[in-house]
Amino acid sequence: MLAAERRRVIMERIQATGQLVGSALSVEFQVSEETIRRDLEWLEKEGIATRIYGGAVLAGTDRAAPPYSIRKNTNIEPKVSVARILSRLVQEGDTLMVDESSTAAYAVRALRHLKRLTLITNSLELLREATGQEGWHVISTGGTLKPDVLAHVGPHALRTVSAYHARYAILSCRGINSQLGLADSDDEVVQVKQAMVASSDCAILLADHRKFDRSGFVALGKLDLVDKLITDCAPDPQWQERLQQAGVELLYGE
C-alpha cells in the first residue's frame, strides 16, 4: 500500500473512531512504528489529530471539522450513494440552495444530467463544479470568505440567501444526535444553513451513516428542521423511529 493510501485509511479511521493506537496500526499495515509516527505527525500538521503517548486522538473532539481539501476526498462511496438518491428527487427547472459541505459537491455532480437548474450557493467548490453547465443559472451568495471551508459567510451571504426562494435547501452537518438534534462545527456556517432552510419549501439533509450519534460544537436545529434525510444505508430501528416521530422522511441506499 502506498503512503498516500495508508494515510487516507488512517484518516478515515480516526474520524470514525476518534482515536488511534500506533502499535496496532504498525501491525495492521505491516510498517514500522517510526513510519506510523510520521503518519500521525502528518495528521497533526493537517489539523486532523492530536498526538498522544502511543497514538493520536481526533483533534478538538467535535469542535473543528477537518479542512475541506481533506473532507472531500474521504468517505467517498457513501457520499456518492447519497448523491445518487438525491438525483432522483431533483427535476428539470428546480431551484436549489446548497451549502458548503463536501457531500454537496457530490450531489451537484449527480445532477449534471439536468439541462435547466438554478443553483444558489455559498460554496466556492460548488461554483467550480457548476462551471460550464450550460442551461444552469448559478448564483453566488458572496460574503466573507472562510478559507477552511471554502465558503462565504456573514451578513452579505445571509442577505443574498434571504432575497431568494428555492424549492429545495440541500445541506449536511457534522453530526446527528438524539439529544441535541443536528449540529455543526462553526456558528457562521450554521447561520447560512439555517437561512437556506428558511428560504426553501423543502429542506433535505445529506448525512452518511457516520453522522448518526455524533455531536457537534454548534447547534443547527432539532431533527424536524429538515423535511427529508438521505443516508447511504438503513439507520438502526431507534433512529428510524425518532425520524418518523419528528416527521422527517427517511431515504437510504441499499
Image: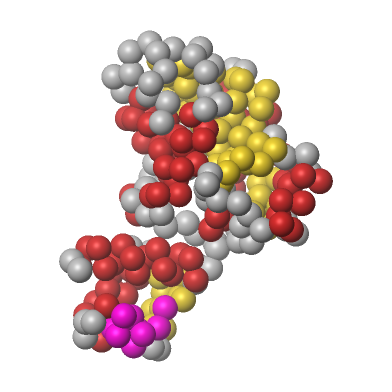
The residue most toward the front is 254
Name the magenta segment's main secondary structure: helix
Q: Can residue 75 be seen here?
A: yes
- Residue 47, image x and y in percent? 38, 64
Q: Quadrant of the N terminus?
A: bottom left
Q: Quadrant of residue 112?
A: top left
Residue at 41% over, 37% down: 105
96 w.r.t. 7: above or below: above
- The residue closer to the viewer here, 100 or 132, is 132
12 relative to 250 in the view: left or right: left
* Segment tinted magenta in the rendering: 20-28
- Residue 172, image x and y in percent? 55, 43
44 relative to 227 in the view: left or right: left
Residue at 38% over, 11% down: 135
199 w.r.t. 248: above or below: above
- The residue closer to the viewer here, 229 or 102, is 229
Specify whether residue 101 is painted magenta: no
Residue at 61% over, 20% down: 167
- Residue 222, image x and y in percent? 74, 47
- The residue closer to the viewer here, 233 or 150, is 233
